[in-house]
Amino acid sequence: MASSVVLASSPLPRHIGIIMDGNGRWAQRKNQLRTQGHLEGLKTAKKIVKAASDLHIQFLTLYVFSTENWKRTAEEVRFIMGLVKQYLKAELDFYRENRIRIRHAGDPGGLPRDIVRELEEACEDTRSFEGLQVILALNYGGRDAIVRAVGRWLDSLKKIEKIEKKPLEKRVPVKITEEGIRSCLDNPDIPDPDLIIRTAGEYRTSNFLLWEGAYAEYYFSETLWPDWTEADLRVAIAAYQQRERRFGGSKP
Ligand code: FPP
């Protein structure tokens, strides 16, 4: 049944972003610890990565840990970081078999060293794979990503200032452009998300892909993330395929 949902004749989203929400509520409803919800959430993430790969989706960004999630208890933060480490280590054979490339979005500066090492290794080991690209948004915030992009731009101007030995204020003013900012984002080569999914009945962006999601189609699901299945992904994609995207233009 699930396999018949996606419409063969309409284009698939090239890039899907997912705000995986509801792990805590899933656990609380079952009288379990919140950490159990994250464990189930990880299992779901694995299933959805496989489903997206089988559907030949090109990019999948998963919102794993935001710049605001540090406000959670130290125990919960430690648990989520442990899951990330486990995921990066244990799934290497799966990425290889499915030619899945792992990438990172977010500030590595604020992450524990061992996580950064695992992330770098997974990104390096899978760099040449031409299948689905899974972008783990980890210590990621949309505002922070824009601030860091502008910082990179400023750094490059300072380098020019050094080479040309001409202070910035004496140079022809640099034109600030969208393309310029985009080129300084974490992953400038990745196309904007076409579809952003949020689970667990919340209707907000929570600082996810603020710049890149300007013209994304949003899909909200009432289902808690640990209960999500391939069928839910297909229903979301089918809903996307019914949308008319005008990017601010008018109906032809
Ligand atoms: C939101 O649910 C979920 C998170 C902040 C953590 C997401 C992490 C995982 C799914 C596991 C790691 C995944 C990978 C791919 C490495 P919540 O805790 O805010 O739920 P609630 O709103 O019900 O409390």
Image (tube, rainbow, N blue to C red):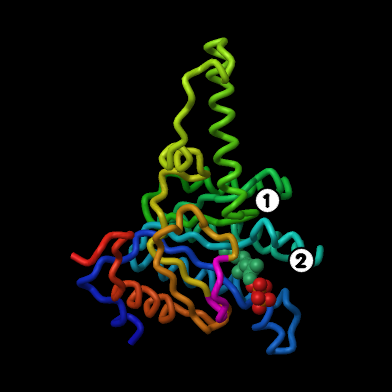
3D distance between C-alphas at marks 2 and 1: 18 Å
Observer-side mark, 2 or 1, equals 2
> Considering only vertical position in the picture, is 189 above or below 195?
above
In the rendered structure, are the residues bearing label 2 and label 1 in contact, judged by CB atoms less than 8 Å apart?
no
Instruction: Classify residue 91 as left or right of residue 196.
Output: right
The kind of residue on which mark 2 rests is Arg
Crowding near pointer 2: few (<14 within 10 Å), some, many (20+)?
A: few
Residue with the mark numbered 1: 115
Chief secondary structure of the magenta span? loop
Residue found at the far top of this picture: 165
Q: Secondary structure at mark 1?
A: helix
* Image disc number at residue 72: 2
The image quadrant where one finds ligand 1 is bottom right
Pointer 2 or 1: first along the chain: 2
Q: Is residue 127 left or right of residue 89?
A: left
* Residue positioned 57% across, 80% down in the render: 200
Q: Quadrant of residue 141?
A: bottom right
Query: Amino acid type of disc 1?
Result: Ile
Query: In x, y percent, where is residue 56?
Result: 33, 63
* Residue 11 location (% of width, % of height): 26, 66
The answer to whether the residue bearing label 2 lies less than 8 angstroms from the nearest atom of ligand 1 is: yes
Residue 37: tell me if it is visible: no
* 149 in relation to 171, above or below: below
Q: Is residue 201 magenta?
A: yes
- Specify the segment rendered in magenta: 199-205
Q: Quadrant of residue 74?
A: bottom right
Let me know if residue 165 appears in the view: yes
